[in-house]
Image: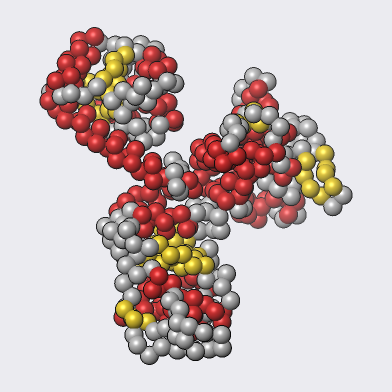
Amino acid sequence: MTQAVWIIDDDKAIRWVLEKSLARSGIAYQSFSSADDALNALYDATPSVIISDIRMPGTDGLKFLGKVKQEHPALPVIIMTAHSDLDSAVAAFQGGAFEYLPKPFDVDQAVALIERALAESRSSEAASEDAEAMPALLGQAPAMQDVFRAIGRLSQSSVTVLITGESGTGKERVAEALHRHSVRSAKPFIALNTAAIPKDLLESELFGHEKGAFTGALGTRRGRFEEAEGGTLFLDEIGDMPTELQTRLLRVLSDGHFYRVGGHTPIKANVRVIAATHQHLEERVKLGQFREDLFHRLNVIRLRLPPLRERSEDIPLLVRHFLARSAANLGVEPKRLSEAAMALVQHYAFPGNVRQLENLCQWITVMAPGQSVEMQDLPPEFRPELVAGSGGAIELPPAGDGSGVLPTLAGDWTMLLAREVAQRLAAGETGIIDDLTARFESTCIKSGLAHTGGRKVEAANLLGWGRNTLTRKIQELGLEHGE
């Protein structure tokens, strides 16, 4: 059963005061004398708000906050702290606390703060329901949080937005979110990939055509601008739009009118345009391949979507979501990745970004043999011991061979690193980072000096160090090279 507010404090008097105050306000509650008891209860229920003391026996408030935010990032947590405990208050905010409540506190102030947190929680729950339709917009990485904040800030505006990012990062999902949370949400969201439409059909696709405008135009046809009337038109891969159509699009954005192909009557366009591209439009402008005036019209607000490799901390969250969704679609139990398998996936480069990760989860749901997915159950490209080569699969040397040199891979070398770390952690080793850092630096130095023919100044430059740093590293690592 879901409880509205959880109170966590080892001080019975504090718990009693808050319980009575919440009861008078008609707010359901449950009390715990320790954070550990509350963590155990979280397995069976999720509250709407938590108010917790910061200093308690066992797990303290800050550690508790960190664990809660790991599993329930949107759950508001209020931290209670003494006046003198300013450092802890700052740490609480850095850890994601909703607010902190200094002791001794005014009871009415405490209830008002809890009610504000409850309102925030209800808002987050509604947003979570929306997110179900847009799973690619999950993420706790700072770069994704910036995107979420921008969507929120733009919710009351119809300003033009340019979304940039690599293929597969979820640009259309962001455009959908911008529409869904805008004042135009009741009107259509129309998407068009300008790179997927043949050049000679794109103009008609965008603006429509009149009967007899060209061979095959047997009737009048509405274009995407008319279909999106009052709503949002999403133009994906805008960088591939032919130059002559760029001129027509600029005219629509400038004066708000357009003509159907073969038409002579201007049609008013009440449409918000959101454009997206994986290309560097500034470079295309310099090369004369994209109109500078159109670029500035589109580039009113720019949202950059980070590639998945820049937010690898989001991969476990996305994996769990995609596995659950794939399982629901097939009517089977969701599969789960072991720690070692998750480490490999989390350190993969994912050139196809979130789309590639979703495809992987679909593959796992169908192809992996058991409910618990191990490293050997992953597709070949994710397994470091098998790398595709001209002669088929190549067996790599065992991890931790002490050579200090990683073999050249067709895939991502960090997968090897992830495997080695996982194996050494499982073996109970300590000091892993120091050892791996030394091996990494040794490899870089050897390769740098080999590249420059032993010239230290040049090698240091290329590696990003000063000459003295390189000399010191050579001594520390026991490497011997001539000038």
Image quadrant occupied by the N terminus:
top left
Residue 69: image location, x then y, percent: 40, 31
111 left or right of 379 in image:
left
Q: Quadrant of residue 442?
A: top right
Question: Height in image: 251 above or below 240?
Answer: below
Name the residue at 44% across, 75% down. 223
Residue 63 seen in render: no
Which residue is situated farthest in the right direction here? 391
Name the residue at 36% across, 58% down. 179
Q: Quadrant of residue 269?
A: bottom left
Name the residue at 34% across, 81% down. 267
**Foreground residue, 479 or 49?**
49
Which residue is situated farthest in the front direction here? 218
Residue 58: image location, x then y, percent: 39, 12
Residue 434: image location, x then y, percent: 61, 30
Question: Height in image: 167 above or below 122?
Answer: below
245 left or right of 88 in image:
right
Name the residue at 47% across, 61% down. 164
